[in-house]
Amino acid sequence: MGLVITVFPAQLQTGWMHGGKINRLMRVEGAHDSTSKDLESFAAESDLKQIEIGHQCGQDGQMGHVIGMPAQSDPSQMDSECYPALIVPAIGTWPRFDSPLRLGVMASGTGTNFEALHNAIACGDLDAQINVLVVNKAGCGAHDRAERLGIHCELRDHRLFASREEMDHDLVRTFQNEGVEAVVMAGWMRIVTPVLIDAFPGRLLNIHPSLLPSFKGMDAIGQCLSSGVTVTGCTVHEVLNDVDAGPIVAQAAVPILSDDTRERLSRRIQVQEHRLLPWATALAGQRWRTAAATQG
Ligand code: GRF
């Protein structure tokens, strides 16, 4: 028996994208009529025959567990790979803008968060476009993904710059030339300086694999595993001139299981990162556009 989960279309797509083994979908009766209809048509059109739409039974209170968990589900069979986040922001209606947000993305690693942003745009959730991806390592996963997805990618090898500031001046020029209005650091493994931060005030986002302000800096997942905490997660925040600090845009909490390894916990956090980053970008985008309209 797999996991039964209340799910909305955006979550569903992300869930499947990342191999979540959702095999039954529940909807809250009457509460989300249009969403429920979307779910039904998604299920009908899907190849995934195991999808079945259930209905919440409509009792007044919930036990704080997944709505509609059937009696026959065996907790020991719950696949930890699709263990839900404890707390995730409610992904409601994705905001629409006068014109798509013009994003620059920075990545150093495998690029799964970059691709999650791309996918959220491609499926029509995130009203944005990625004008340019900047990577600092030739041949990193993010670079390969950009090639496959047909997204303009520029390499800026940090070893070729005399200082961090010099590199950040170059990044600012690159983003300005590409008409970027906001920048998302989607796994950028370099400390950035006020040169970049001040060029995009409040418009530079970062994703970090912990519930900030806990476990800042390197190896956040290792830090949290050795600390003994039982809940961790991920955070999207605006970047200030301090490592992993700045106003929090959105967070998702992920339980730490007793037998967790760094790899398993890391995978579960990443599943939430891929949901969180596009949604947080949309939320921040609303603020950017409102501020821009106010400033005239
Ligand atoms: C993510 O876990 C993010 O939190 C951290 O770097 C990682 C990047 O992963 N800042 P990916 O390259 O997006 O797969």
Image (cartoon, grey):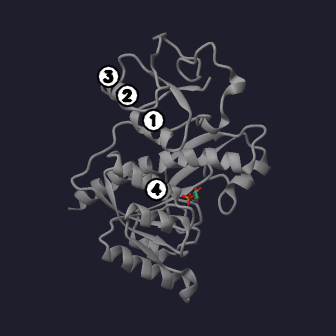
Q: Nearer the viewer, mark 3 or mark 2?
A: 2
Percent position (x, y) of residue 80?
67, 35
- Label 3 residue SS: helix
**For the residues carrying marks 4 and 3, which lies nearer the camera in this image?**
4
Task: From the image, tell me which residue sits under label 2.
Answer: 39
- 3D distance between C-alphas at marks 1 and 4: 17 Å
Label 1: how many Cα within 10 Å (few below 14, some 14–19, many 20+): some
| Mark 1 vs 3, N-terminal side | 1
Whether tag 1 and tag 4 are in contact, CB under 8 A, the answer is no
The disc at residue 115 is 4
> Which residue position is annotated with label 1?
12
Above or below — where is 48 with respect to 215?
above
Secondary structure category for the residue under label 4: helix
* Identity of the residue drawn at 32% across and 59% down: 129
Task: Specify the label residue 33 is tagged with.
Answer: 3
Amino acid type at circle 1 is: Leu
Q: Quadrant of residue 12?
A: top left
Q: Quadrant of the C terminus?
A: bottom left
**Foreground residue among 177 and 157:** 157
Q: Earlier in the sequence, mark 1 or mark 4?
A: 1
Say if mark 1 contacts mark 3, CB within 8 Å: no
Q: Is mark 4 within 8 Å of ligand 1?
A: yes
Do the residues under discs 2 and 1 have CB atoms within 8 angstroms?
A: yes
The quarter of the rendering in which ligand 1 is drawn is bottom right
Q: Residues within 10 Å of mark 3 (few under 14, many from 20)?
A: few
The answer to whether 266 appears left or right of 180 in the picture is right
Report the residue at 49% width, 75% height from top: 194
CA gap, disc 2 and disc 1:
9 Å
Residue type at mark 3 is Asp
Q: Say what secondary structure mark 1 lies in.
A: helix
